[in-house]
Image (cartoon, grey):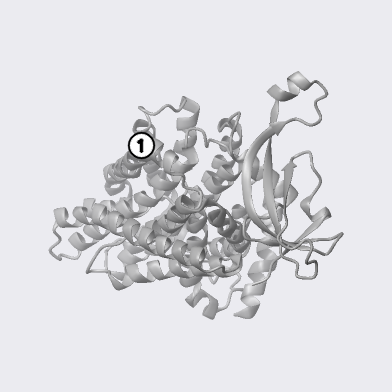
């Protein structure tokens, strides 16, 4: 298994680089590597690795959903809340209905089997959508209107809604008595339970972080452990209390961000570094689940059913955004962002076959084909349309992130070393401010034209310099300044 991990790292990173070089999302390269190296083609990934791939993929998904939670702003959620709820239900219903209309005639299956197929295909892939939305939020694109946040929230609830419908239809096929109303009631209960448990877990972590001065790596590991625990709790409570564990994972980040932005930003930066490895595992192992031979059996009829479903889904997505302040181009972007399928289809696509559904093998084939067709095309469409359609906003707070990324600035709580004096300082306060442009010679114009900057307050804790101990200094950094590492070194101790 160790060699398989090494293979995933080396080939996955290479494929990521090549995809980005060709102006495509890096995840496309990783998915293709997984398909090629998986057990259905070259079989380079060991059977032991494939047995635990589900756990690895879940941990990687938790990492990116935690990052998403640390990006969820309360005001933006209020702005897009109603639209997100409608968008999480209406497109899925439209897609299931469209597949139900054409699948029986084109695939020679029953209407109930068509509903099962539709409920599998109707789920959006958070593995594909969430990382791309996080990238746009990091760039400040679409943030003014909350478009990435809308898609993040809607896609998470969409999966809950669709999986419940899938359970209902599969239960009906098996002849078991399924109370439709009771199952549908599980949807709001599952959402509410997941969010509440996540908020409680996040608040407890916040109290621990405030009362105990743990270093950033330990805080990040605690948050990751809490996220994994929530998904474990969802399985334990299955059949007792419905709970959307992945929504709870996002809620952890949200409540910590609400209570302490410095702590949230610090943890988010560490998660971003973990995501480099987690991303490789997620997309390569998702690709490894794809059996091209099975997908081939779906044929043109299967591709046609997927296309019809996407047309109906796109119609539902556009209708759900009619009463929003979005332009028609922004609505079209949301339509494209709702296309990719991968995670859910890979997870439940084989369940009908295992449960004895007559067309189970055909359903699995179409589920696999939907991944091959929509994940790459959807990811490419999201990337290119987002860069052209989503705006930055004049005074976007995300311009401060560009400064942090470019200059490599520390966050509150981190210790830094002055390279010239060897003094050790601790960042005790930071602010995002707008300052006059120092390069503008015109004093009147300088007061009007301001640029974003990060203000840092540092406290000297070097015991070797008793005269300086306890002293604080303030530093401003803008995009015009040199790199932080030119004069300082961040001490990443545990």
Where 152 sits versus 225, above or below? above
Q: Nearer the viewer, residue 118 or 481?
A: 481
* Residue at 59% in and 60% down: 275
Quarter of the picture holding the N terminus? bottom right
Q: Nearer the viewer, residue 92 or 435?
A: 435
* Residue 83: % across, % down: 36, 37
Say whether residue 402 is visible: yes
- Left or right for 183, reference 134: left
| The image quarter in which residue 218 lies | bottom right
Say whether residue 289 is visible: no
Mark 1: give few (<14), some (14-19) or many (20+) Cα within 10 Å. many
- Left or right for 256, reference 197: right
* Residue at 78% in and 22% down: 443
* Residue 101: % across, % down: 27, 42
- Left or right for 413, reference 252: right
Q: Nearer the viewer, residue 112 or 205?
A: 205
* Residue at 37% in and 45% down: 305
Quarter of the picture holding the C terminus? bottom right
- Left or right for 45, reference 186: right
Q: Secondary structure at mark 1?
A: helix
| The image quarter in which residue 390 lies | top right
């Amino acid at each position: 298994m160790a060699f398989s991990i090494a293979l995933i790292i080396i080939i996955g990173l290479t494929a990521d680089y090549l995809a980005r070089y060709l102006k495509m999302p890096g995840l496309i390269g990783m998915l293709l590597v997984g398909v090629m190296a998986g057990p259905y083609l070259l079989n380079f990934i060991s059977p032991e690795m494939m047995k635990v791939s589900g756990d690895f993929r879940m941990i990687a998904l938790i990492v990116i959903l935690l990052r998403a939670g640390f990006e969820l702003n309360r005001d933006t959620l209020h702005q897009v809340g109603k639209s997100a709820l409608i968008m999480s239900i209406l497109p899925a219903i439209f897609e299931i209905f469209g597949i139900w209309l054409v699948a029986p005639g084109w695939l020679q299956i029953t209407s109930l089997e068509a509903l099962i197929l539709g409920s599998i295909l109707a789920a959006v892939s958070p593995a594909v959508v969430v990382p791309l939305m996080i990238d746009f939020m990091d760039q400040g694109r679409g943030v003014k209107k909350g478009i990435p946040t809308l898609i993040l929230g809607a896609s998470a609830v969409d999966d809950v809604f669709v999986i419940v419908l899938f359970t209902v239809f599969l239960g009906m096929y098996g002849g078991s008595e399924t109370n439709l109303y009771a199952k549908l009631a599980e949807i709001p209960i599952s959402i509410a339970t997941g969010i509440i448990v996540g908020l409680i877990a996040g608040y407890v972590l916040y109290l621990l972080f405030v009362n105990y001065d743990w270093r950033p790596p330990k805080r990040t590991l605690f948050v990751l452990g809490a996220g994994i625990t929530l998904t474990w709790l969802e399985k334990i409570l299955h059949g007792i209390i419905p709970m959307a564990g992945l929504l709870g994972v996002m809620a952890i980040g949200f409540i910590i961000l609400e209570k302490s932005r410095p702590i949230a930003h610090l943890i988010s930066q560490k998660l971003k570094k973990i995501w480099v490895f987690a991303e490789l595992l997620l997309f390569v192992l998702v690709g490894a689940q794809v059996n091209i031979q099975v997908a081939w059996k779906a044929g043109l009829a299967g591709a046609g059913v997927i296309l019809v479903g996407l047309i109906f889904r796109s119609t539902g997505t556009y209708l759900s955004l009619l009463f929003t302040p979005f332009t028609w181009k922004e609505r079209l972007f949301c339509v494209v962002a709702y296309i990719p399928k991968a995670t859910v289809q890979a997870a439940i696509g084989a369940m009908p076959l295992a449960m004895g559904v007559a067309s189970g093998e055909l359903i699995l084939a179409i589920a696999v084909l939907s991944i091959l067709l929509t994940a790459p095309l959807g990811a490419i469409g999201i990337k290119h349309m987002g860069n052209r359609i989503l705006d930055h906003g004049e005074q976007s707070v995300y311009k401060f992130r560009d400064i942090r990324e470019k200059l490599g600035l520390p966050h509150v709580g981190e210790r830094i070393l002055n390279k010239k004096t060897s003094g050790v300082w601790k960042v005790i306060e930071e602010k995002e401010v707008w300052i006059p442009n120092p390069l503008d010679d015109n004093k009147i114009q300088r007061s009007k034209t301001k640029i974003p900057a990060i203000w840092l307050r540092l406290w000297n804790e070097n015991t070797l310099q008793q005269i300086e101990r306890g002293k604080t200094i303030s530093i401003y950094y803008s995009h015009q300044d040199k790199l932080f590492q030119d004069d300082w070194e961040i001490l990443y101790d545990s």
